[in-house]
Amino acid sequence: MPVITVDLHSIATEQKKALIKNLTKTAAEVTNIPAEKFTILINELDSANIGIGGLTLAEIKAARAR
């Protein structure tokens, strides 16, 4: 049972569905393993728990919104 794990910021349910569908399809095509054998795990991280260039993602988003 292959497992694909994705860590990212919070996304909408529809985006998760599309991500799961497309990751599964691509992995199955590349590996020749049936799609139903794949498990996709999405770990959502709070924006305060992601740091880029010394700032949290929350800070970066807030600065862009200004």
Image (cartoon, rainbow, N blue to C red):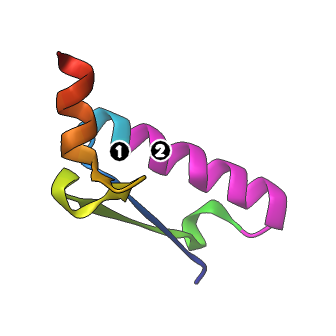
Q: Residue at x 27, y 47 (%)?
A: 57
Which residue in the rendered view is the most extreme toward the front? Answer: 54
How many C-alpha atoms fall within 10 Å of the one at disc 1: few (<14), some, or many (≥20)? few
Q: Quadrant of residue 38?
A: bottom right
In-image side of 31 versus 21 (left or right): right
Measuring from the top left, give residue 64's x and y in whole percent: 27, 22
- What residue is drawn where x is 62% and y is 61%? 35
What amino acid is at disc 1? Lys
Residue 3 x, y percent position in the rendering: 54, 77
Mark 2: amino acid: Leu
Q: Position of residue 31 (x, y in %)?
A: 81, 67
**Residue 65 as seen in the image, left or right of residue 24:** left
| Closest to the observer, 59 or 11 | 59
The residue that disc 2 covers is: 19
Q: Give the structural element (helix, strand or loop) at label 2.
A: helix
**Quarter placement of the C terminus:** top left
Name, please, the residue furthest toward the top.
Answer: 66
Gap between marks 1 and 2 measured at Cα: 5 Å
Instruction: Find residue 2 and report its image quarter.
Output: bottom right
Q: Nearer the viewer, residue 33 or 50?
A: 50
The residue range painted magenta reads 17-33
Q: Which mark is residue 16?
A: 1
Mark 1 and mark 2 in contact? Answer it, CB < 8 Å. yes
Disc 2 crowd, CA 10 A, few/some/many (<14, 14-19, 20+): some
